Amino acid sequence: MGRTVTGCTSDRVLQRQGVPALGCASNGVTATGRTVTGCISDRVCQQWGAQRRGAVTWCASNGVCQQQGAQYTKLGYAGNTEPQFIIPSCIAIRESAKVVDQAQRRVLRGVDDLDFFIGDEAVDKPTYATKWPIRHGIIEDWDLMERFMEQVVFKYLRAEPEDHYFLMTEPPLNTPENRENLAEIMFESFNVPGLYIAVQAVLALAASWTSRQVGERTLTGIVIDSGDGVTHVIPVAEGYVIGSCIKHIPIAGRDITYFIQQLLREREVGIPPEQSLETAKAIKEKYCYICPDIVKEFAKYDMDSRKWIKQYTGINAINQKKFIIDVGYERFLGPEIFFHPEFANPDFMESISDVVDEVIQNCPIDVRRPLYKNVVLSGGSTMFRDFGRRLQRDLKRVVDARLKLSEELSGGRIKPKPVEVQVITHHMHRYAVWFGGSMLASTPEFFQVCHTKKDYEEYGPSICRHNPVFGVMS
């Protein structure tokens, strides 16, 4: 082909995907030419208390971390602090018209297998059918998922899968059959040397270690994972999810966006109808925050509106003219539905603090105090300012009220020991799951607990039904 390939990506793979060779992320540059955070495995190993063994040099290119969600897939090389790529988890395929001739149908099927796009490219293909193979975190269409991952590995990461161990994430309560299906794809189609399937909640707990001293690091805690479509409250004890106690909350980022859109529509502020959802999302991400007391917040805005009301400027997509709207009560009313869900959903009345308390009370009694002490936030919808502070205050009130009632019912004979409530926030909790996986996959212990290709060939895909909690995670 007359060109030299730099890095670990082969010319054959690049030719297959039709992309130029720019070097691989292990050399410091991603496929888009964007500089990678860097190979930080030396520092990571020291930070996490892991020791190097033998003469092997562990670098970020040895492990790949991939978190696939219903809306977005995050992927990159282990050891980096942020994923190299965040792409929509969709695939655009061409749906051919029915063809009677069998030979022609076989030809079209072969062409269609190569004619597809993923991520942002898929969203921008109006003549193709856009499919979302993941629903509520669970992979539902494995054929489409395999094609999606083909471009993820070869076109985005530009890696030879035979050279990298993979850490893949899964949602809570994922079925063993799904783990087997994933193992078949990774070992049969991509021929990876090793695979580890990690529960997202456990990785989020591991990511919270960045804000703790070494002696305080634990894998027992409550994970509140809130993305765009769903919020889960997940209890974890010693690295294992207590599946029977998981609670689902029908309030997440998308519901906040819809609620803000409704508030703006009621005010008739002059937003182009076709841009109302996009505008509401931008306002949510730029201006919204959690307030300590909603009544006092209303009074604060009424007293000094000039100080608290912000202005949002947008461009009309049709006539390219500017439009300006005032953003007032929406700033705190939007995310308030986490604590007063009846504002947006009259069928659900429990605040997030009540749900967290209920989950912990359903857990075995010997882990309840450690769970209250380690409530960890994960996901983009927990990024609102003062979210953790408000949750900690409300949860503490619920716990203290129960202890006070217990003392009153005993006539003062029982003096319950105070329960420590602590909500952990850290600067990485937007990408907590991916970051936790990246850090763990950059330690030597990761390569020892991965299911290998040799194990797969000897025992079959059932070996991936169980993935042990390993050294640095315990």
Image (spheres, rainbow, N blue to C red):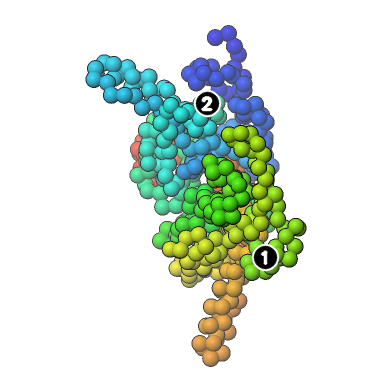
**Location of residue 166 in the rendering, given as x and y in whole percent from the top left corner:** 50, 37
- Give the SS element for disc 2: helix
**Location of residue 351 in the rendering, given as x and y in whole percent from the top left corner:** 52, 65
Amino acid at circle 1? Glu
The mark that comes first in sequence, 2 or 1, is 2
**Location of residue 294 in the rendering, given as x and y in whole percent from the top left corner:** 63, 66
Amino acid at circle 2? Lys
Q: Nearer the viewer, residue 307 or 141?
A: 307
Tell me if mark 1 has few (under 14), some (14-19) or many (20+) residues whose alpha carbon lies within 10 angstroms of its own.
Answer: some
Residue 180 found in image quarter: top left
In the picture of the structure, the residue carrying the numbered disc 1 is 297
Q: Residue at x 66, y 59 (%)?
A: 386
Q: Is residue 361 above or below residue 70?
A: below
Q: Residue at x 65, y 42 (%)?
A: 323
Residue 4 found in image quarter: top right
Q: Which quarter of the rendering shows the C terminus?
A: bottom right
- Give the SS element for disc 1: helix
In the picture of the structure, the residue carrying the numbered disc 2 is 155
